[in-house]
Amino acid sequence: MTFGCETDADGTPKIHVVNVTYSDSDIRLNIWDNACKAAVEAGIPLWQENQVWLIVTECHLQNADGTISGVTALGSSAGGSSGIAMLSSTMLPFMDEKSQTDQTPYNGRVVSAIGPRPLIQSISFPWFEGETFASLWSSYIGAAAHEIGHALGLAHDFRSDVNASGNLMGCGLRGIRASNYGANHTRLTADDAKVLSLNRQFTNSTPDHTSCPVVSLPSPPWRENGVVNFPFAASDDAGLEVAQLIRDGAVVSSMRLSGTSGDFVMTVPDAKDAKWNELELAVWNVNGGKSSATTANTFNNEHAPHMFE
């Protein structure tokens, strides 16, 4: 399954180019807020029902010291039926087919679309994006998929994840070139795949996202045998599908659900070097409707559980 997109008459994806009244320096002051405002003022229907947009901000500036200002990669959703993914124009020169396998180091090279000065390793781009044009391709194609994931309602997920090898919604996004480079690996978790499959952007029908599960937290979590147990209750007449436990915007545990109601327990590894104060429980029904419940300071400070970072 995949999402459809708006196309031109010949079937190619449609790109809208709009001029805005904001200057480059204005947008760089707060790229997300100001780019969104500028796009709306230029006629782009952001945040409207069933509208998911990939915005490319063309406001970057190559500085004399080799750094680049105006770089961004962000994404956000309004319930999955509308959302925004945002990338900066610094990524576009490296997202072509040739760069995918170009092992030439970018250090010392001039890329006119970036600016008139030579690029500097780990200065022009972060060290974790690698040293070659191919590693930049992988980072930026992965970043586009990652931010579109956010626009479609997915949270971060850093479980079993390291740079360029792991979850698409974590640092593993930079390993999307895995078919050519054995050390790289990008995957989408099975539960994230299920959440996407329920999104109306991935279906030919229009699921009822207005009907959402009823979620409650009937009792506090407890620690036992190296894990923290997080109990919850959920019900939905259409049927329950997926639950995720989210800490600081990142999934720390997930599980598949079935039936129309039940009492459930989610478990999270009890690490010794991390604490938590708040968790969000998100539950989806079979139609993609989502509800969340949040708990704060369930344990007192003396007996705070140590949660997986």
Image (cartoon, rainbow, N blue to C red):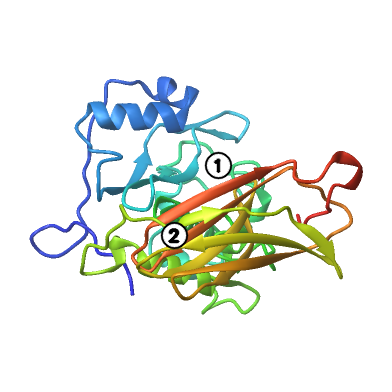
Q: Give me the residue at 63% from left, 31% from top.
A: 65
The numbered dot on residue 153 is: none
Locate residue 140 relative to residue 21 in the image: left or right. right
Determine the secondary structure under disc 1: loop
Q: Hey, what amino acid is under mark 1? A: Pro
Which residue extends farthest right?
A: 302
* Residue in front for this viewpoint, 219 or 285: 219
Q: Position of residue 134 (x, y in %)?
A: 53, 64
Q: Is residue 135 visible?
A: no
In this picture, is 81 found above or below 36? below
Q: Give me the residue at 91% from left, 42% from top.
A: 302
Q: Position of residue 162 (x, y in %)?
A: 69, 63
Q: Quadrant of residue 213?
A: bottom left
Q: Quadrant of the C terminus?
A: bottom right
Spatial separation of the CA atoms under disc 1 and disc 2 = 28 Å
Q: Position of residue 286 (x, y in %)?
A: 37, 69
Locate residue 98 relative to residue 169 in the image: left or right. left
Q: Hey, what amino acid is under mark 2? A: Ala
Q: Which residue is mark 2?
A: 145
* Residue in front for this viewpoint, 217 or 153: 217
Q: Give me the residue at 80% from left, 46% from top.
A: 299
Locate residue 47 relative to residue 154 in the image: left or right. left
Q: Quadrant of the N terminus?
A: bottom left
Q: Position of residue 78 (x, y in %)?
A: 38, 45
Q: Nearer the viewer, mark 1 or mark 2?
A: 2
Q: Which residue is mark 1?
A: 118
Determine the secondary structure under disc 2: helix
* Residue in front for this viewpoint, 241 or 95: 241
